Amino acid sequence: MKKSFKIVYSVLFFAVCAAPAVLLPFMGSSAEIEKKELTELPVFIDNDGINTDFSTQFESWFNDRLPMRSELLSAANLIKGEMLNTVSSNVISNNGWLFYDSEKLDFMNTNALSDRQINAAAVTLSLLEEKVTSEGGRFVFVPMPNKSSVYWEHMPACYTKADENNLTRLSAKLSELGVNYTDMLSVMIQNKELGIYHARDSHWNNLGAMIGYNEIMNSLGRPHNTYENASYTYEQVWRADLDKLLYPAGGFMDWQYTFDITYSTFRFMQPSGVHDTAAQLAVFMSDREENDGNIVTMNMNKAPNKSLYMVRDSFGRALLPFMIDNYANATFVRTDRPELTSSFADKDFVYEIVERNLKNVIATAPYMFAPERNGVTYPDISISGNADAVFSDEGYAFRLYGRLPEDADSGDGRVYAVFRSEAGERVFEAFPIYENKLIGEDGTNGFSMFIDKSTGLSGEYELVVIADSKAYSGGKIIV
């Protein structure tokens, strides 16, 4: 009997071990569920000889195609997340509430930007606002708080909430500079008892988006439909992003508000050829995020406002129907690099970004022509050191970027590029942005700008970069 048991046990053991290989040809891919690119099947010998990484690459290939991978991952996360409340699949789980694991950095302020970076972000946004308002448009910056910043009581007790972080520090600096922004953190906290974020998703729900939309329009000072008396249903119909990370094979549906609102008729100009606008809008508002990098709409009825240019992330998808309904023309762009080369006359510019990505505001300079400054005063130029500068003709504009000594003070964050020649000098204000990808080294004390060719720069210049009332030599520039 004992021997028979061992035989049966051994057969079952090897059968379980062999099952993945046996089932592999018959199982479908989990790539669509997990939203990941599968590893390609490696070759052992190629034109360069033996592939020394073959075993590692093959393991990655096999793991991506492991039969019942999604089911096994879901089962493991059910135990770790729902029963043990531990971090799994980059998700913090606590009594039915889910948070991105990366949110703990903002929550505890362990990813604090330097004062120089906070100043750089605030100055960058002030330059965007100046460009928009100088041409007759309106500007508002919309920093969206992480869910843990609003519903901090649902974070595990092992995480201690900091009194300040990047969002609160940047908000204070924007107030100091007079930059128009929507204090969405205060708005969300004031309305949190209504249940405005999903419990199992990283985003706000449709009610939160409606409240946020009204605050954005109030910040712009624009007339708008409030939809305050709209009827709604509240049902468990939302497939939450964090829940999907935990349970790719199918988990728990989250609650969602569905409003009964008759919106104005509109059509999509981008993407083109859309015949069923309702179906296309539903795709853009879902978590599928397909081809939503550039959305352009035209309202077929009389809208209260003319034009909108909105830089957004995934939080912005729930705002789409409200914004489309209130503008004759609307453009929604998912990018970390706003473009401001066209006119903003009678156009609104909304810049929305979630708290955990605030550093992206200064990841690379927006595509906007640097403003030329007249009457900028600074002490007599006495070179304080060198500015490593790169100047190039990009065809559509001149490009100048570089870095200053890291130990140099940045002062108020303003950086000016002075082009000096025998005929005089031309001064342009740069974004105080360190172009890490272009420079190839980490740093924070940098400058970056595009110069419109119509400004007439031509000839040989001595470049001097001014920051904190100190001058740095940028060498000779030939335009």
Image: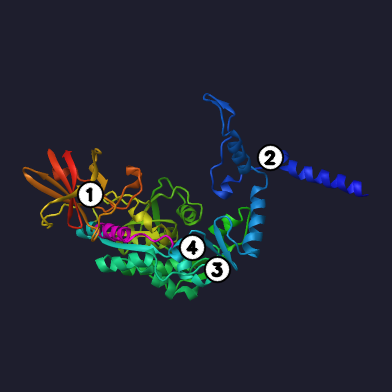
Which of the two labelled residues, at mark 3 and mark 4, occupies the earlier sequence position? Answer: 4
Circle 3 — which element? Answer: loop
Q: CA distance from mark 3 to mark 4?
A: 10 Å
| Dot 4 and dot 2 residues touching (CB under 8 Å) | no
| Dot 4 and dot 1 residues touching (CB under 8 Å) | no
Q: Nearer the viewer, mark 4 or mark 1?
A: 4
Which of the two labelled residues, at mark 4 and mark 2, occupies the earlier sequence position? Answer: 2
Q: Position of residue 181 (x, y in %)?
A: 32, 66
| Dot 2 and dot 3 residues touching (CB under 8 Å) | no
Circle 4 — which element? Answer: helix
Which of the two labelled residues, at mark 1 and mark 3, occupies the earlier sequence position? Answer: 3
Circle 1 — which element? Answer: loop
Image check: 190 left or right of 8?
A: left
What amino acid type is highlighted by mark number 4?
Lys
Q: Quadrant of residue 301?
A: bottom left
Q: Which residue is mark 2?
A: 24
Q: CA distance from mark 2 to mark 3?
A: 39 Å
Q: Position of residue 190 (x, y in %)?
A: 42, 75
Quick one: 185 or 411, which is closer to the camera?
411
Q: Which residue is mark 1?
A: 369
| Residue at x 46% of width, y 66% of height | 108
Q: Which residue is mark 3?
A: 156
Image check: 438 left or right of 278?
A: left
